[in-house]
Amino acid sequence: SLHIRTCSLGADDHNNGNILLEQHKEALNYFNSNDMNVLVFSDNNVFASKYINELKKTSDKQFHLIDETQFKSLFVASRCNNHVAHVSTLSFWMSYLSNQNNGETIYFKEFEKCHTNQMIHPRLEWKLFD
């Protein structure tokens, strides 16, 4: 799963931090499989659709934008093998609740600026990208 949080909804009174396109490209390239399906979840699907088009320019992965409520998105994402987490507690739970033991989660340094690094327990073995 790839979570893109834009903090652009009317109810958002804060910005959790931004993950740059280049950071997402690097994280996705970490997963060697080009035939990988990437389920994309976002709070702004118009933005996410354009963002996916940019990612496709440098990746052969298959991107699928998921247009569901937060609860259904959480359920679906938790079934994914691998995760590229955003600076978001929803993104954290999408990865944490994943029942796939053979998958990997990548998170970014920006997560620790808005949340404590104590949330990422060492036994999780998540990969920190700068």
Image: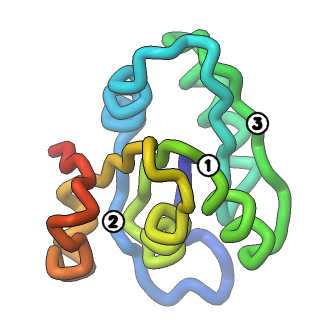
Which is more foreground, mark 3 or mark 2?
A: 3
Could you give the CA–CA distance between mark 2 and mark 1, rounded to whole angstroms?
A: 24 Å
Q: In the structure shown, which secondary structural element does the residue marked by tag 2 occupy?
A: loop
Give, as a three-letter code, the residue at label 3: His
Label 3 crowd (10 A; few <14 / some 14-19 / many >=20): some
**Eyeballing the image, is 22 above or below 83?**
above
At x 40% / y 75%, what residue is drawn?
15
Which is more foreground, mark 3 or mark 1?
A: 1
Query: Is 50 in front, or is 24?
Result: 24
Give, as a three-letter code, the residue at label 1: Cys
Q: In the structure shown, which secondary structural element does the residue marked by tag 1 occupy?
A: loop
Image check: 123 left or right of 29? Answer: left
Label 2 crowd (10 A; few <14 / some 14-19 / many >=20): some
Could you give the CA–CA distance between mark 3 and mark 1, rounded to whole angstroms?
A: 13 Å
**Eyeballing the image, is 28 above or below 10?**
above
Query: Is 57 in front, or is 64?
Result: 64
Residue 8 image offset from top left, x and y in percent:
60, 69
- Please state, as top left, top right, bottom left or bottom right, where the C terminus lies in the image: top left
- Would you say the residues marked 3 and 1 are in contact, meaning their CB atoms lie under 8 Å apart? no
Residue beneath disc 3: 64
Residue beneath disc 1: 80
Residue beneath disc 2: 17
Residue 5 image offset from top left, x and y in percent:
53, 62
Which is more foreground, mark 2 or mark 1?
A: 1
